[in-house]
Image: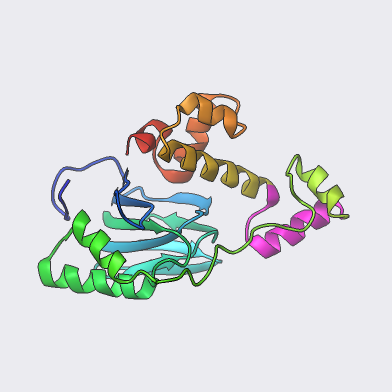
């Protein structure tokens, strides 16, 4: 796929690619009407740039929208969910190491190129991102840890180690991180699975290594969170 445009082959809603020799961890396209995903977070910064329709997110409880030629930056480890709109959405996602790129400048560069040429190729994306790569990482991913809660075990065990009741621990954790402890645990396991799949590990082994009952269990949870099956994601 040399160029991302509004017209062309309609792929699955989510598709992923991993460019070589780039600071970008992953590139993705989102295309369709049903683009809603439940609350989740990534270990990487997410930059979303819209080509058609309107991309709608709820980030930290606030609705955030972007139309054609506009973008959204979702910092690493920030819980968010996406919503459907009235029209088909076509957009691209860039996943980059936390703080490695100046996100507003990358989005502005993408917008200038898109207005000038009417499209964006993979080479354009990587070049524009690299043009705004910082010489030093200015910020690491925000810590999602709560004192005394690692290693995880059960939520009750984590609460006990923190010297709190289960209910008090859960309230404090959700207030700090925007998701309850059990949802955070699941998402961390899914993000670890994402990392292993990118490395080409077998799906069954990934399921076992990340604490899922079996490959089918991982598949159901993975697709619900990221919109794509582990097999298709791994093949990216």
Q: Is residue 136 above or below residue 124?
A: below
| Front residue (pair 193, 226) | 193
| Residue pictured at 64% horizontal, 61% vertical | 177
Residue interval drawn in magenta: 164-181
User: Is residue 113 rendered to the left or right of residue 76?
Assistant: left
User: Which residue is farthest left?
Assistant: 117
How many labels were placed on the picture? 0
| Residue pictured at 36% horizontal, 58% vertical | 23
Residue 198 in sight in this render:
yes
User: Is residue 62 rendered to the left or right of residue 127?
Assistant: right
| Residue pictured at 45% horizontal, 49% vertical | 37
- Residue 123 at what x, y percent from top left? 20, 57
- Residue 20 at what x, y percent from top left? 29, 48
Residue 86 in sight in this render:
no
Q: Quadrant of the C terminus?
A: top left
Q: Is residue 75 above or below residue 104?
A: above
| Front residue (pair 207, 64) | 207
Q: Quadrant of the N terminus?
A: top left
| Residue pictured at 20% horizontal, 61% vertical | 124
Q: Is residue 192 above or below residue 139?
A: above
- Which color scheme does this rendered protein use? rainbow
| Front residue (pair 152, 221) | 152
User: Is residue 120 rendered to the left or right of residue 81?
Assistant: left
- Residue 162 at what x, y percent from top left? 84, 54
Instruction: Give the main secondary structure, helix, strand or loop, of the magenta stretch.
Output: helix
Does 180 lie within the magenta span?
yes
- Residue 159 at what x, y percent from top left? 82, 50
Quarter of the image for residue 77 reads bottom right
């Amino acid at each position: 796929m040399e160029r991302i445009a509004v017209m062309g082959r309609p792929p699955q809603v989510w598709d992923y690619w991993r460019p070589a020799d780039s600071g970008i961890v992953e590139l993705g396209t989102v295309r369709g009407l049903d683009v809603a995903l439940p609350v989740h977070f990534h270990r990487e910064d997410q930059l979303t740039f819209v080509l058609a329709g309107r991309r709608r997110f709820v980030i930290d409880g606030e609705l955030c929208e972007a139309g054609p030629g506009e973008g959204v930056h979702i910092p690493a480890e920030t819980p968010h969910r996406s919503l459907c709109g009235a029209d088909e959405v076509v957009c691209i996602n860039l996943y980059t190491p936390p703080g490695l790129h100046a996100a507003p400048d990358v989005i502005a560069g993408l917008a200038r190129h898109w207005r000038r040429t009417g499209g964006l190729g993979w080479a354009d994306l990587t070049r524009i991102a690299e043009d705004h790569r910082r010489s030093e990482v200015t910020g690491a991913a925000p810590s999602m840890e709560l004192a005394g809660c690692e290693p995880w075990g059960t939520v009750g065990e984590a609460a006990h180690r923190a010297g709190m009741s289960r209910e008090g621990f859960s309230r404090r954790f959700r207030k700090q991180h925007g998701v309850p402890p059990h949802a955070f645990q699941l998402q961390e396991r899914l993000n670890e699975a994402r990392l292993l799949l990118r490395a080409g590990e077998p799906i069954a082994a990934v399921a076992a290594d990340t604490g899922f009952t079996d490959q089918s269990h991982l598949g159901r949870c993975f697709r619900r969170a990221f919109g794509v099956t582990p097999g298709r994601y791994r093949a990216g």
